[in-house]
Amino acid sequence: MTIESVSTDKETAQLNMMKVIWLGLLFYSCILVFVAFKVLAPREVREVKEELILQIVAIIALIASHRLQKYLLKNVQNQNKKRTDIEKIKAAFAPFVIALSMSETVVILGFVLVILSGQPDKILPFAMAGILNIIYFYPKKEKILSQF
């Protein structure tokens, strides 16, 4: 076994771990939508004064998911210019998880709105934005390495 193949095995393991986390958050977000429609089926409809605030926070979380990831990766890049592929993938792990968690926050905010309003359809714009953002962050080796 050569050094290059060991590095490739480690890269694959790291990418697989990132993919499992990605898939877990994507699945969790879909479960929230299911629960909103099937478990929290339409109930007494209430007006939610905080709906605009939840929408604004969701937009901020979406923007932050991209900005924070770029900011954190930029800080990593400034520390050391010469990195192997596995080092780059490992360095991208924390920014990746933070970006996903910010995307998940959007779906959770929609879920909170469903609980407060009693209207399951209120989750849809939040879920679409959050889930599409999670899909955007799918961890591909080429995409990760191109960020460095």
Image (cartoon, rainbow, N blue to C red):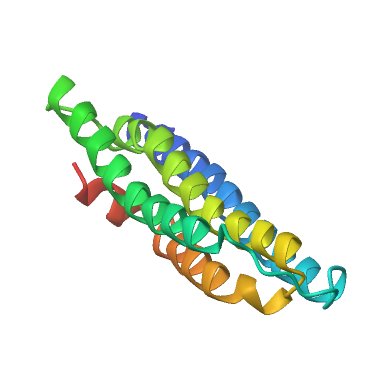
Q: Nearer the viewer, residue 124 or 132?
A: 124
Judge whether residue 89 can be spotted in this image.
yes
**Does residue 18 lie above or below 49 as drawn?**
above
**Does residue 63 lie above or below 37 as drawn?**
above
Question: Would you identify the image quadrant in which residue 26 lies?
Answer: bottom right
Quarter of the image that includes the N terminus:
top left
Q: Position of residue 15 (x, y in %)?
A: 47, 46
Q: Position of residue 143 (x, y in %)?
A: 29, 55
Q: What residue lies at 46% left-to-right and 57% top-to-bottom? A: 58
17 vs 67, left or right, is right
Q: Nearer the viewer, residue 48 or 16?
A: 48
Question: Would you identify the image quadrant in which residue 86 lies?
Answer: top left
Q: How many marks?
A: 0
Judge whether residue 80 can be spotted in this image.
no
Q: What residue lies at 52% left-to-right and 74% top-to-bottom? A: 125
Q: Nearer the viewer, residue 72 or 83?
A: 72
Q: Position of residue 37 (x, y in %)?
A: 78, 76
Question: Would you identify the image quadrant in which residue 127 lies?
Answer: bottom right
Q: Position of residue 116 (x, y in %)?
A: 72, 60
Q: Nearer the viewer, residue 48 or 107?
A: 48
Q: What residue lies at 28% left-to-right and 33% top-to-bottom? A: 72
Q: What residue lies at 46% left-to-right and 35% top-to-bottom? A: 10
